[in-house]
Amino acid sequence: MKIDFVSDVSCPWCVIGLLALEQALAEVAAEGIRPTVHFQPFELNPQMVPEGQEIVAPLTQKYGIAAAQVAANGEALRQRGAELGFTFS
């Protein structure tokens, strides 16, 4: 079995997804299931300026959500990361 993992290296949700995938693969390894993971690059924001930018404004604009929802999504990200043993600095 081949798994294509498509992600942007700067996307924290992609890190969470990879950790969850690795955890799931470890759980099924005892059953002899050993797929290969093939990494595919994807650029979430090809218009990003080289110096980067503050995150709230682009997310509110891109997804049409309020700053409070961006904050709530960030907290959900931190919680899911913690469940998988990952912390953000």
Image (cartoon, rainbow, N blue to C red):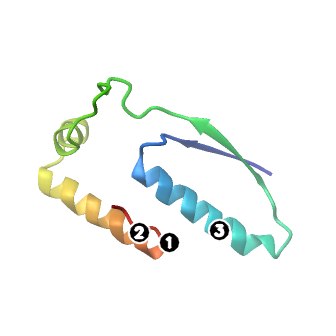
Disc number for residue 41: none
Q: Crowding at label 1, few (<14), some or many (≥20) Cα neighbours within 10 Å?
A: some
Amino acid type at image mark 2:
Arg
Residue at the spot 48% in from the left edge and 50% down from the top edge:
14
Amino acid type at image mark 1:
Leu
Query: In the picture shown, does residue 6 fall above or below 78?
Result: above
Residue at the spot 75% in from the left edge and 71% down from the top edge:
28
The answer to which of marks 2 and 3 sits earlier in the sequence is: 3
In the figure, residue 53 lies in which quadrant? top left
Residue at the spot 71% in from the left edge and 70% down from the top edge:
26
In the picture, which quadrant includes the C terminus?
bottom left
Picture coordinates of residue 3, whole percent (x, y): 70, 48
Q: Which residue is mark 2?
A: 80
Q: Which residue is mark 1?
A: 84
Q: Regarding mark 1 in the picture, which secondary structure is present there?
A: loop
Of the two numbered discs 3 and 1 in the rendering, the one whose residue sits closer to the viewer:
1
Q: Crowding at label 3, few (<14), some or many (≥20) Cα neighbours within 10 Å?
A: few
Looking at the image, do the residues carrying marks 2 and 1 touch, with CB atoms under 8 Å apart?
A: yes
Picture coordinates of residue 87, whole percent (x, y): 40, 67
Q: Is residue 69 left or right of residue 77?
A: left
Q: Which residue is mark 3?
A: 24
Q: Is residue 37 left or right of residue 82?
A: right
Query: In the picture shown, does residue 39 fall above or below 69?
Result: above
